[in-house]
Image (tube, grey):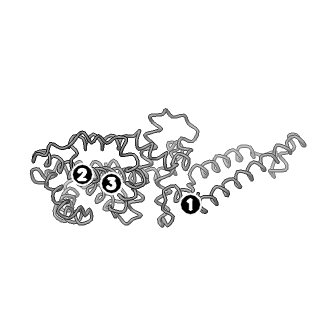
Amino acid sequence: MTVQGTNTVENNLHKLWEELEAARKMQDDWMNHGVDFVDLYVEDAGGDWLEKWGKCEEELEEIKIKKVDVEAAKVAIGISDFWHTELLETALSSRGDRSQNQCYAGQEVKRKRLSLLGGAIFGAVVTDRLYREYPDLDCDAISTLKSRLADNQKLSEFAQSLNLKELNWRVCCGQETDQIEYNRFLAETFEALLGAIYLEFDRDFFRAGNWLIQKLIEPTMGEHLDLTQQSKGTLENELKRREILGADILEAIAIDYLYNRFPDRNSSQLTRWKNLLGAKEIFPKEFKTKLGSHYLELESNFSRTRDWLVDNFIKTAVDELEDETGDRFIS
């Protein structure tokens, strides 16, 4: 464990010790003074101190739930110089009963936006890796392997391997949640974390992809990779491989653009607009295959591909959709 990690553990243990000591003292006062121990802790023993105390306890509990140990998170993900810590706090924010606590509603919207972005980046990184590193892998195998790595169970395992379960263990504020729902939340948390890392790296697909591959994808690839599913070596199969690559690059670029252009829109609204772009038929026939080829021609440079795609297709299409839908965009 690093020195930073050791200090974090020691600080947490010290805080726990202080809380235990305070609780022990209160228990001793109760045993020594009976109900009169209340006078030691409140000024108006005959008033509504109990109700106020209860509200105070709830507020303190909410603070504990909301608070993210940023330093511990930096250690867990291996990025000690993570500068935009508010992104980590959002990605790792706990999920409470927001119908009862509206102050967390805005944080939840931000977390889901990050999750949407991170999920799109994850898909593009994995497909790009499979296409380039395994040229003999059949197109169907690429799709199958990507689906296995991107399902909620696997993403939740990634989250737990980074200790995210411990960093936001109060995910349900004491409410019971079944395992499937819990895994879904951990998967969202992992995707949000990847979205935060992507933004921290100034939307650098290569750097975020390297972090993901080295930290998680490469170590687990062998568990799912079946090298017997080799490419048939036909032109048709290669075109399908490029179509798969182009589809995920298009998804990532569209979500990335919408995320940054509309910072006040929630994840459902961004997804709706991404779908509207597809329905608008702004792309030529077999565009996903051509985009995959263009991406390769640009030496798998995501930033250059993004600029080209946005300038030539997406920006104009979104401008037109804004004019067509007007206020309906927020619905």
Residue 7 in the image: x percent, y percent? 64, 60
Considering every residue shown, the one lying at the far front of the view is: 228
Residue 156 appears in the figure? yes
Q: Nearer the viewer, residue 321 or 174?
A: 174
Give 291 or 184, whichever is nearer the viewer: 291
Q: Residue at 15% of width from left, 57% of height from top?
A: 293
The numbered mark at residue 71 is 1
Query: In this rendering, would 284 be left or right of 145?
Result: left
Task: Between label 1 and label 2, give the one nearer the viewer.
Answer: 2
Q: Nearer the viewer, residue 197 or 10?
A: 10
Kind of residue sitting beneath label 3: Ile
Q: Residues within 10 Å of mark 2 (few under 14, many from 20)?
A: many
Label 3 packing within 10 angstroms: few (<14), some (14-19), many (20+): many
Question: Where's the N terminus, which quadrant?
Answer: bottom right
Measured as percent of width and height from the top left, residue 199 is found at: 39, 62
Please give the residue where the numbered disc 3 appears in the rendered image.
Answer: 121
Amino acid, disc 2:
Tyr
Image quadrant assignment for residue 46: top right
Q: What element carries label 1?
A: helix
The residue depicted at 67 percent of the width and 57 percent of the height is: 10
Q: Can residue 273 be seen in this view?
A: no
Which residue shows up at 16% across the image and 60% down it? Answer: 294
> CA gap, disc 1 to disc 2?
36 Å
Does 102 sit above or below residue 184?
Answer: below
Q: Which residue position is annotated with label 2?
A: 131
Q: Are marks 2 and 3 in contact (CB under 8 Å)?
A: no
Extreme top residue here? 178
Residue 218 as seen in the image, left or right of residue 228: right
Measuring from the top left, give residue 71's x and y in whole percent. 56, 60
